[in-house]
Image: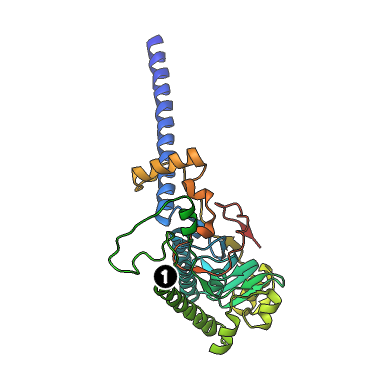
Amino acid sequence: MTLDADVIIDRRKMRRRLSFWRVAAFLFLAVAIVSLIGLTIGRDNLTALRGDHIARVPIEGVIVHNRRQLRILERIAKDNSVKAVLVSIDSPGGSVSGGEAMYAAVRAIAEKKPVVVQVNTLAASAGYMIALAGDRIFARRNAITGSIGVIFQFAEASRLLNTVGLSFEAIKSAPLKAEPMPYHPLKPEAREMLQSLVKDSYDWFVELVGERRSLATLRARELSDGRIFSGAQALDAKLIDAIGDENAAVEWLKEEKGIDKSLKVRTWRMKPREEIWQPGEDASNWIARTASRAVFGTDNGIKSYIPEALALDGLVSVWHASVLPGRAIGKDTDSD
């Protein structure tokens, strides 16, 4: 009888162990499936899982060519759960190429679903360029916008180098190769080349303003002298459509574009890079990111100590105000 009792107890213990491992295996499988779905949709955003909504896209700080932001805009364009888009801009401007890329991405969305733009504090230069992509532009009465124009900036340090007795030589295939250089004053032919480059981008920007705001070319050029406008002034100049906050912009979507009034606004925002190694990431990149974070406290290394406006790619749109304090990133927020 004792032997039978021991066998029964052992069998019960074995069943409990098997039940535990079955549950653990099931949970592991469930986590793996959810992770796989997340990787399939993309690490940048999981809003697509939340059902029908109005997508809020914050565009903040200095504008550069940002592949992660562009990927989010592409996903929004393809996501059938996004019924309309609210582009919220707080930017002093940035590179012309970065503004052009983001303008094109927002226009691609607008071809499929309604897009409204709302300027909170600042949408200048490349920021205003992106605002032009919307179906309608709202701005607060005292917001700052405009600054339509292009500037190419570079340093010329030849006098400083002469003072310290330092000189640089360059063997070039042609006189305009690698111009401008900081080691000598700008030559007339180099200045002419750069002026031509700036004018080409400026003419494109002015044409875009005239086309999107239904302005005559002469009027668009008059408004594109680099000046900034308050929201009220921009309304008078027909650079925006209405004075209003985000609630007014959302109300316009629901009243004028027939968007379901019960839909909530949900933010699509870039999440910070995870500190762990990601599948598909080059090991050397991960090591560099980890070392940079340990030394500088950021993935950007020494670049984090250089003002963004001095490290922009390509031609730079006019008027670099101090970059606005960034908001917390990495969250999806809901609002009525």
- Return the x and y of residue 303 as percentages of the image width and height: 48, 50
Tell me: 280 left or right of 194: left
Is residue 269 something that shows in the picture?
no
42 and 93: which is toward the camera? 93
Circle 1 Cα neighbour tier, 10 Å, few/some/many (<14 / 14–19 / ≥20) = some
* Badge 1 element: loop
Q: Amino acid at mark 1?
A: Lys
- Quarter of the rendering containing residue 235: bottom right
- Return the x and y of residue 204 as percentages of the image width and height: 47, 79
152 and 299: which is toward the camera? 152
- Compared to residue 193, the image places residue 45 above or below, namely above
254 and 308: which is toward the camera? 308
Q: Residue at x 39, y 24 (%)?
A: 14
Pick out the residue farthest to the top: 2
- Return the x and y of residue 112 as percentages of the image width and height: 47, 75
Where does label 1 land, which residue? 187
- Compared to residue 282, the image places residue 130 above or below, namely below
Q: Residue at x 36, y 46 (%)?
A: 279
Q: Residue at x 71, y 70 (%)?
A: 142
